[in-house]
Amino acid sequence: MKTINNYNLDCTFKPKSIAVIGASTKPGRVGYEIVKNLINGGFHGRLYPVNPKGGEISGYKVYKDISEVDDEVDLALIALPAEKAVNIIDKVGTKGVKSVVVFSSGFSEIGNLELEKQLYRKCREYGIRVIGPNCAGIIYWGSNLYASFVPGVKKGDLALISQSGALTAVLVDYLNWKDIGLSLLVSYGNRIDVNEIDIMTYFRDDESIKAFMIYLEGFRKGEGRIFTEAVKDILRFKPIVVLKAGRGTAGERAVKSHTGALAGDYKLYSDILSSMGVALVDEYYELVDVAEALSVLPQPKSDNIVIITNSGGPAAILADFISYFGLKLPELPSALKEKLSFLPSYMGRTNPIDLTASGLSDIYYETLRVVLKDEWPGCILTIHVPPSFVNPVEIASAVRDAYLDSKVEKPLIPLFLGLRREQAYKVLRLSGVFPTPFNHRSAALSVKWLYRYWRARLRLS
Amino acid sequence: MKTINNYNLDCTFKPKSIAVIGASTKPGRVGYEIVKNLINGGFHGRLYPVNPKGGEISGYKVYKDISEVDDEVDLALIALPAEKAVNIIDKVGTKGVKSVVVFSSGFSEIGNLELEKQLYRKCREYGIRVIGPNCAGIIYWGSNLYASFVPGVKKGDLALISQSGALTAVLVDYLNWKDIGLSLLVSYGNRIDVNEIDIMTYFRDDESIKAFMIYLEGFRKGEGRIFTEAVKDILRFKPIVVLKAGRGTAGERAVKSHTGALAGDYKLYSDILSSMGVALVDEYYELVDVAEALSVLPQPKSDNIVIITNSGGPAAILADFISYFGLKLPELPSALKEKLSFLPSYMGRTNPIDLTASGLSDIYYETLRVVLKDEWPGCILTIHVPPSFVNPVEIASAVRDAYLDSKVEKPLIPLFLGLRREQAYKVLRLSGVFPTPFNHRSAALSVKWLYRYWRARLRLS
């Protein structure tokens, strides 16, 4: 399905005026939540709630019909039952609106293919670009546009583009738990028009976005090729992390019955995507962890990975994932060992470098200074499991200081474990240069895609 | 290395009297924490703190020397520096103690092989069984024995046997976060004598333990075969879940430098172990999630898995893992579809059964009743992502009621997602028959090992 027109997405993401069709005074209703979120989000432009009942919502006059609005409307947010949503397009189109978000469900996802086709045809007729239907809306902090019923999305510098509203909610919960925000959120549901390529292309140069996260269910036939072509261009500007459902046989069938999309075409392209440097992940938390890592970490200059740890067990588990993902954890060269000879003899000068439970903040600091300055290591992972007498925040501060003091651009992924890690991660996040992986797997997975991304990016530039 | 003698482990795990050698009045010291934990844990037996300084700790007289204790001592907990720990064995042995836990580090884990051999030889000479050295101690609630400095271990029905003290702490944090307790904790560190086989064999018939979790670093040469032989017997009684570090090349080297153990031998046996029904996992949280699942779930009676969900995206991700782990998610047979015809037409009667966002507690209940009663499904997974207007506790209650009302023994794994799931999982855990997986991966992994475990167990019985 081709896009409806070449009209760019300014009306969608940078609207000067918005009509909310199906605006409601009842909390819990989509038409209420959106108006509330737009107001609380601080939308700068003009807002026109529309509902045949008229009246007032939060101090805004409610128009009985969009035709009554005496202003140009850039974007219409449609929160009506499916059939009404289709029928309203005539009025919206006649009004000259060029962009809609259709929240309504009841289309192809429940087998109503015909109604979805009608929606598409009507929009096409008026040259209207569509996000949705069956979606949770859009948020773009660049224009204080909180046009979604997903609550609690904080300002940040990642972009999330998701076909599933439910998964969007799960991801936002995880982002909030990590205290990471988004610059852009697009829940595009059944994806009849505006798709992930349109969105990434539109935001390619947007400096408020450091990485794209995509949850994708279906490609339509032939779209895999279009996708791979398009990402080549986008990857020169920003990393892309994809969680694609429907990789296995069962998942493929699940996707088909969910959004009516074909998962199959993707299989043909996943190897290509991965070799192109698009990061592919399997779980929701990995989507966030890997995107966070790729958004903050610099380019690794050598393939040699070094682990610095205060406990052997977790280091061994991480080392297993390092091997599993095809990465290198070589023995330390003797010159580097020599530089580490200030360490007590019982702190292994092997790789992982095991500082043992006696590895306190000063030892972390000194060891990191050496390993950061030395040219041999291309990427450093630190692990810390706090003994009861150690405050992990002290170690996090030492890691941060060692990095900032060294003034070297080298990827450093700090893995903190145990419940008390939250404060440590908070300290690290504040400096804006460290990812905060959930577990060994996502720490190693981030490193894998960091290497692949940079390899591809150097080839592309 | 053979075990020191055939003396059973009663003195270790069911001691009537304990000496704490190196007892301390200083909070933070191992010798203080252990005494405190033994007292707070409610140890029934007699407690004898030992320290050359004498005095008193928490109302207990401190003996200057173990020889002064006018009582038989079953277990000595040794919290002394490494060399002193070795030297004290003569006094401990002369006193007739048959069991020690050596907390002290400074042995093979830092290259001090000779000192470790001395410790072993001395213990052997006196016929003393050893846990450790370089360990975090033991907890067995069956005798209110909290002889460990790991804080916060709650009473429950899983057993954790771990070579790494740091990983033990991480696992206990995760168990507490899930609000799951342990019946038994053994941190056995360098593992010079008592090993996981001794422990599992000793507790094989213990009804307070529903599953064994093992974090294992090294097998010594030839031990892989002994391990595989022994677990055959234990698996007839309880499931075993193993997280083995040192599977990859890098991890293997990490393990070797950590506890001086050989990881290699395990590789030869991992296929055998897995085909025997020993559940093998890769990450710390998987160790807990899979053990929880195997400890509460009944035997599946058919290979057909059914997913019931309120959101297509998460169901597709789960379906992908189902395929990845070699499990079956077939189309529903027409007889079962027929029974589900009470569902509105837009709720897919495919597999996954998608109840959509309209899938509230009554619909979950009715659907589950049908799927539980029908003989075709062998295992059921439910997914719930709460829309903002739904309290996940209501859905959890419906899942629980449907299961209890149906009076059918069928494995049911409920996956709740999003931050608000904690209360839902609390409700489910209280009934004692549901696991509470962290994510899609561990839900599917639990199902994989549930099938393998029962296949093996039926073969063994």
Image: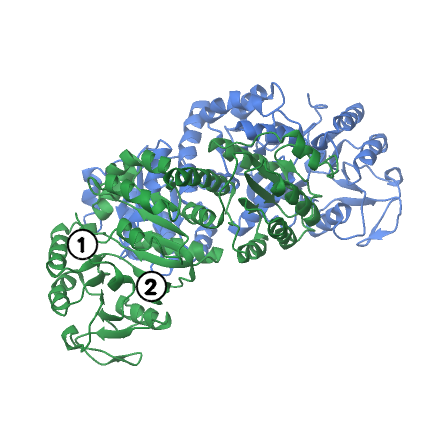
Chain colours: A green, B blue
Q: Which residue is mark 2?
A: B389
What's under tag 2, amino acid-wise? Phe
Determine whether, in the image, residue B303 is placed left or right of residue B246. Answer: left
Residue B11 occupies quadrant: top right
- In the depicted view, which residue is nearer to us: A368 or B325? A368
Closer to the camera in the image, A80 or B147: A80
Residue drawn at (40%, 62%) of the image? A153
Query: Is disc 1 placed on a helix, strand or loop?
Result: loop
The answer, for residue B355, to whether it is visible in the render is: no
Q: Is residue B389 toward the left or the right of residue A102 in the image?
A: right
Q: Mark 1 falls within which chain? A: A
Q: Is residue B198 above or below residue B61?
A: above
Q: Residues within 10 Å of mark 2 (few under 14, many from 20)?
A: few
User: Tag on residue A168?
Assistant: none
In which chain is the residue bearing label 2? B
Residue A365 placement (x, y as % from top left): 66, 47
What is the secondary structure assignment of the residue under circle 2? loop
Q: Is residue A174 rendered to the left or right of residue A355?
A: left
Do marks 1 and 2 both belong to one polypeptide chain?
no
- Residue that badge 1 annotates: A107
Q: Residues within 10 Å of mark 1 (few under 14, many from 20)?
A: many
Q: Is residue B246 left or right of residue B374?
A: right
Q: CA distance from mark 1 to mark 2?
A: 22 Å
Quadrant hosting residue A356 = top right
